[in-house]
């Protein structure tokens, strides 16, 4: 086992797939039980020049690669459009996976200066990375406009018991903030703050079964922006409160790849970042969802259904047809799926031409070559 694990554990096809998604992914009678499978996609090019981490995004590499789509409400496009624009970019080289973002903000503010504090209590920018796409053992990084960071590792999502490893200190990470305007000054109006982050590939490799950036590799990644409703009192920013309840108004959550619910810890709905050896600006590369993702999504919906069934009836089922009692539609599963049930456990298997795909009661997905 790798050191960090020892330490912290101890385009055409794409279009046709999207066209089919409404039919193939509606496994439920109820609307919006789970989101339709339509994660965002970004092709990540190799950097064409050295990246200096200063938050300013002046390198040619940043100029040559596209921005992501604008962030949207975490629940999806049916919800209100964010008040301020947020977009991100990514590039890579032999040592680092680089992330940059630009966050429009008329009043740039921040209070938290303690490392590994809960940064999202300020307005923040967040990165989530699951390199091998199994929804377990993934990385979370948060930073505010003061360049204060929180880095942690999730053994598995909170819904499946966590736990978060807050003691993680990411070796070799670089991060910076640039502010176009002023910080914590309510007397003026600002333009934006931008961030740059360099994650060492050798570190992320230790949670990814060797999935470092290289030609043809795909990671699951997402970005989030937490934005609080604030007001100025005596020259200082304070979070607004509901006048009736006196409770702090809930934050806004704006993301790159929507989650369907207010919960970032759903790695199966994060975006796809596809790496290419082509340098930024050389030529355009397309990406299609692998066929295996359709299989994994069917298994994921079965997992959702099993969890819902157990919450209502106290146990998992081995006969998928029983899940119709909670509104699930087994007949829409794209292939036969075998289910084994134990004492408070289950394991489901789907068979493809080359591999057998599995999911268990903790939402962990994996495959075995046939």
Image (cartoon, rainbow, N blue to C red):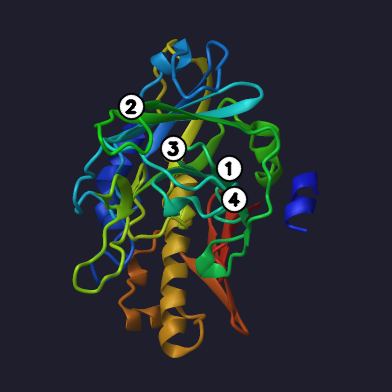
Tell me the element at label 2.
loop
| Left or right position of 157 against 195 | right
Q: Nearer the viewer, mark 2 or mark 1?
A: 2
Q: Nearer the viewer, mark 1 or mark 4?
A: 4
Q: Quadrant of residue 259?
A: bottom left
Mark 4: few/some/many CA within 10 Å (<14, 14-19, 20+): some
Mark yes or no: residue 354 visible: no
Q: Quadrant of residue 13?
A: top left
Q: Residue furthest bottom?
A: 313
Q: CA distance from mark 1 to mark 3?
A: 27 Å
Q: CA distance from mark 4 to mark 2?
A: 26 Å
Q: Which residue is mark 4?
A: 116
What label does residue 145 carry, if any? 3
Q: Earlier in the sequence, mark 1 or mark 3?
A: 1
The residue shown at (25%, 35%) is 187
Q: Earlier in the sequence, mark 2 or mark 3?
A: 3
Q: Which residue is mark 1?
A: 131
Q: Earlier in the sequence, mark 4 or mark 2?
A: 4
């Amino acid at each position: 086992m790798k050191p960090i694990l020892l330490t912290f554990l101890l385009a055409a096809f794409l279009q046709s797939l999207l066209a089919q998604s409404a039919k193939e992914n509606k496994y439920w009678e109820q609307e919006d039980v789970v989101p339709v499978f339509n994660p965002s996609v970004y092709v990540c090019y190799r950097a064409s020049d050295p990246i200096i981490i200063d938050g300013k995004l002046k390198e040619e590499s940043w100029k040559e690669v596209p921005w992501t789509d604008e962030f949207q409400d975490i629940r999806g496009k049916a919800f209100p459009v964010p008040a301020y624009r947020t977009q991100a970019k990514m590039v890579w080289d032999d040592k680092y996976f680089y992330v940059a973002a630009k966050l429009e903000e008329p009043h740039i503010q921040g209070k938290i200066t303690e490392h590994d504090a809960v940064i999202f209590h300020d307005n923040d920018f967040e990165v989530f990375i699951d390199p091998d796409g199994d929804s377990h053992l993934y990385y979370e990084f948060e930073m505010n406009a003061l360049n204060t960071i929180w880095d942690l590792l999730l053994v598995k999502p909170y819904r499946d018991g966590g736990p978060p490893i807050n003691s993680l200190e990411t070796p070799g990470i670089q991060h910076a903030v640039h502010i176009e305007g002023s910080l914590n000054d309510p007397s003026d109006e600002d333009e934006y703050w931008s961030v740059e982050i360099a994650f060492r590939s050798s570190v992320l490799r230790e949670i990814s079964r060797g999935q470092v950036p290289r030609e043809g590799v795909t990671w699951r990644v997402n970005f989030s922006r937490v934005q609080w409703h604030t007001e100025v009192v005596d020259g200082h920013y304070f979070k607004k409160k509901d006048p009736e309840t006196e409770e702090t108004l809930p934050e806004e959550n704006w993301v790159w790849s929507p989650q369907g619910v207010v919960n970032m810890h759903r790695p199966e709905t994060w975006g796809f970042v596809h790496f290419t050896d082509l340098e930024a600006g050389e030529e355009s590369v397309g990406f299609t969802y692998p066929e295996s993702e359709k299989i994994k999504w069917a298994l994921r919906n079965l997992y959702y259904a099993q969890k819902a069934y157990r919450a209502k009836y106290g146990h998992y089922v081995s006969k998928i047809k029983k899940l119709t009692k909670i509104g699930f539609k087994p007949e829409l599963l794209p292939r036969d799926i075998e289910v084994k049930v134990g004492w408070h456990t289950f394991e489901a298997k789907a068979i493809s031409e080359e591999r057998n795909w599995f999911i268990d009661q903790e939402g962990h997905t994996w495959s075995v070559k046939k």
